[in-house]
Image (cartoon, grey):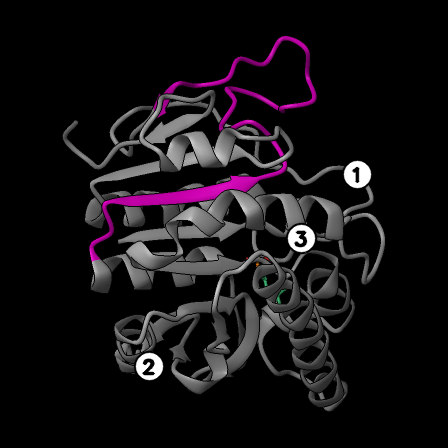
Amino acid sequence: MRLVKLGGSVITDKARPLAFRSRVTRRLSRELAPFKGEGLIVVHGAGSFGHVRAAEYGLARGMKDHRQVEGTAIVQRDVRDLNLRVLDVLIEAGIPAVSLPPATWLELKDGRMVAFDAVPFQRAIARGLVPVTFGDVLMDTERGVAIASGDLLMAGLAAVFKPDLSVFVTGVDGVYDGEPADPGARLLRTVSPDGAQVVGTTAAEGVADVTGSMGGKLAEAFQVAASSKETWIIGGNSPGRLRSLMEGRRVKGTRVLPSGR
Ligand code: IP8
């Protein structure tokens, strides 16, 4: 069983609202297609379909004022729009993708996962389908609403499905010891929760990110690594890298280790 997250910074242009990167998503879908029958779950980020409006309406702070009711509806609608575009491209690549929006199987409590219903995923996989879910704004029993990042969903799904391989496909080649754009920054071959690495955490200038960019991703990636045989963060802009990793080859990227390794 493999769990793959297509990051919002790869499948959308995060600097431009509602800009779907169809070419790169198409290529990544073709790289995933050979593995569709071996137990595959796809998660995708929200990119500029979610973060821009979620930041505008302050949804990461929870439901504090009436305007956020409208904001919640708009952001849920926009991430569905992105999800449909991803489904189109996956299906075109021959992957029998079915959408499982997180609002239908998950509730949050203070931003954490509760009442997680894994049965829809199990049923879909048993029928040879490939479940697809995505970062979204969800109901939260404490905050009114909260953001469920695709990374948080990865952690929850890994805990249940114990994947052989979990992959975060991102806009950069992996985890760096500084800001990825800084020419002096080094790509880290491995990261572990026990190490004291300094990691670049800021999103690029002019880019809204309500879920914490690489810092937030790493916290969830360590959770994923605790339940997966192998966990990687790789770049999605280099053709063939995802496919090579899925085939079991070593690729440029960062391997995320669980505690104690
Ligand atoms: O792009 C964020 O999901 P992510 C979801 O996986 C929203 O961090 C609605 C901003």
Query: Residue at position x 59%, y 37% from top?
Result: 236
The answer to whether 89 appears left or right of 103 in the picture is right
55 and 153: which is toward the camera: 153
Which amino acid, mark 1?
A: Glu
Which picture quadrant has residue 191? top left
Q: Which mark is residue 205?
A: 1
Q: Nearer the viewer, mark 1 or mark 2?
A: 2
Which picture quadrant has residue 20? bottom right
Q: Is mark 1 within 8 Å of ligand 1?
A: no
Q: Quadrant of ligand 1?
A: bottom right
Q: Nearer the viewer, mark 2 or mark 3?
A: 2
For disc 2, the marked residue is 120
CA gap, disc 1 and disc 3: 10 Å
Which amino acid, mark 2?
A: Pro
Crowding around mark 2 (Cα neighbors within 10 Å: few <14, some 14 to 19, many 20+) is few
CA gap, disc 1 and disc 2: 39 Å
Q: Please, what secondary structure does the residue beneath circle 2 have? A: helix
CA gap, disc 2 and disc 3: 29 Å
Q: Which mark is residue 2?
A: none
Q: Is residue 217 above or below residue 193?
A: below
Query: Residue at position x 40%, y 56% from top?
Result: 36
For the record, the magenta segment spans: 162-190
Whichever of callouts 2 and 3 sits on the residue coming sooner in the sequence is 2
Q: Position of residue 176 (x, y in %)?
A: 52, 22
For disc 3, the marked residue is 209
Q: Is residue 44 above or below residue 128?
A: above
Residue 165 belongs to magenta span: yes
Which amino acid, mark 3?
A: Asp
Q: Please, what secondary structure does the residue beneath circle 1 have? A: loop
